[in-house]
């Protein structure tokens, strides 16, 4: 069980409404995770204080949470579309009326706006046409070259016109610091495509299941220089699990839980060895799914396919699981500034 699942089940655990297996799993997590145990003890204090306030000689609330839930008028949430639409309209009639007025105003101005757009110099049309007929050769911030297959010519295009494909993740930002190259480990290094750099996750095993927050370390193979990438936010409870090189200056890194119930993977990010910036590639959006491995497959147009292996847990205790695959086709990196 991980911390997220524990917190979701905490209210039911306090009230004693969980199954025997789930109670055992919750108690085991309390023994293993100090942060969740502290949160649980705080909730118990609040529960006792709340009950002591609302109790008197005649009335004793055995379960304040249950009483509150029983007192909710559930008929308001019945699955009757007509009733719910009338209820929402009455409640938000001022907002709906304002939106309707704005919509009518926009429709009235539409012909004027259309004439202004059609009367432009045609610069936007020229900008749009080039990317549609072209094949991306580079996907970096700033300017890059695109090639027109029909004309065999190249043109410089600003990436501000291209929508980003990966987005800056400030939560997992890294800071870069120097290391003594003599103290580095001898095994488990991964070389960059040009062999100029090698990288690994310090103290992490090949399966990515070692507990703790582990920094990324990398070295310049020709200069005998070494560096460490560690999280700027030292309180983060997550850790790099696995890595491989995306290109000569960027890593594909899986980041997942570092404490509590240790899982095999996490979400997938790009990490720059120059800036320490982290960009989101793929998030599972599900606590029971995690990326455990990534395979790069190069395409003829310069893009790559990413084959992701997902570990999917089937039970609430995170014991039984199976593997699935996800394919990200024609992955071209355009960075979010």
Image (spheres, rainbow, N blue to C red):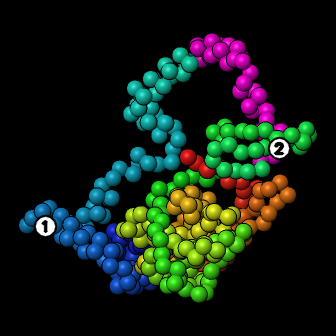
**Left or right of residue 127: residue 14:** left
Majority secondary structure of magenta residues: helix
How many numbered callouts?
A: 2
Disc ID at residue 147: 2
Percent of width and height locating residue 154: 82, 41
Residue name at image x 83 percent, y 44 percent: 147
Percent of width and height locating residue 101: 49, 19
Badge 1 density bin: few <14, some 14–19, many ≥20, Cα 10 Å: few
Badge 2 density bin: few <14, some 14–19, many ≥20, Cα 10 Å: some
Percent of width and height locating residue 231: 44, 66
Q: Is residue 310 visible?
A: no
Of 303 and 282, the residue lying toward us: 303
Q: Is residue 6 visible?
A: yes
- Seen as rendered, the residue at the extreme bottom is 186
Q: Which residue is mark 1?
A: 52
Instruction: Give the spatial CA distance, label 1 vs label 2.
Output: 74 Å
Secondary structure under tag 1 reads helix
Q: Which residues are magenta?
A: 107-136
Can you say whether 38 is above or below 124 in the image? Answer: below
Disc ID at residue 162: none
Can you say whether 187 is above or below 263 in the image? Answer: below
> Which tag, 1 or 2, sits closer to the chain's start?
1
Of 56 and 122, the residue lying toward us: 122
Residue name at image x 69 percent, y 63 percent: 247
**Left or right of residue 22: residue 153:** right
Q: Is residue 126 magenta?
A: yes
Can you say whether 287 is above or below 164 in the image? Answer: below
* Residue 40 falls in image quadrant: bottom left
Secondary structure under tag 2 reads strand
Q: Are marks 1 and 2 in contact (CB under 8 Å)?
A: no
**Left or right of residue 240: residue 301:** right
């Amino acid at each position: 069980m991980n911390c997220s699942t524990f917190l979701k089940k905490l209210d039911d655990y306090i009230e004693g409404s969980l199954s025997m297996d789930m109670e055992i799993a919750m108690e085991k997590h309390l023994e293993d995770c100090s942060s969740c145990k502290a949160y649980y003890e705080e909730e118990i204090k609040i529960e006792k204080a709340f009950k002591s306030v609302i109790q008197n000689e005649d009335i004793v609330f055995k379960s304040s949470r249950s009483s509150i839930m029983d007192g909710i008028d559930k008929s308001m949430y019945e699955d009757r579309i007509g009733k719910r639409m009338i209820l929402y309209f009455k409640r938000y009639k001022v907002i709906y009326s304002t939106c309707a007025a704005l919509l009518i105003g926009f429709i009235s101005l539409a012909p004027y706006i259309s004439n202004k757009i059609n009367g432009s110099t045609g610069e936007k049309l020229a900008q749009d046409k080039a990317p549609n007929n072209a094949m991306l050769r580079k996907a970096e911030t700033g300017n890059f070259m695109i090639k027109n297959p029909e004309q065999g010519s190249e043109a410089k295009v600003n990436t501000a016109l291209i929508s980003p494909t990966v987005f800056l993740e400030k939560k997992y930002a890294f800071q870069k610091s120097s290391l003594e190259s003599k103290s580095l480990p001898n095994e488990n290094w991964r070389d960059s495509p040009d062999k100029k750099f090698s990288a690994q996750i310090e103290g992490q095993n090949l399966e990515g299941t070692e507990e703790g927050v582990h920094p990324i370390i990398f070295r310049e193979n020709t200069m005998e220089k070494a560096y460490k990438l560690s999280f700027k936010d030292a309180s983060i409870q997550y850790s790099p699990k696995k890595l491989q090189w995306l290109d000569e200056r960027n890593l594909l890194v899986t980041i997942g839980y570092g404490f509590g119930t240790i899982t095999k993977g996490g979400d997938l990010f790009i990490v720059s060895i120059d800036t320490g910036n982290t960009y989101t590639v793929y998030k599972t959006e599900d606590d029971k799914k995690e990326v455990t491995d990534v395979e790069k497959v190069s395409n003829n147009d310069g893009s790559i396919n990413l084959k992701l292996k997902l570990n999917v847990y089937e039970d609430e205790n995170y014991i039984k699981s199976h593997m699935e695959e996800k394919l990200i086709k024609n992955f071209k990196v355009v960075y979010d500034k």
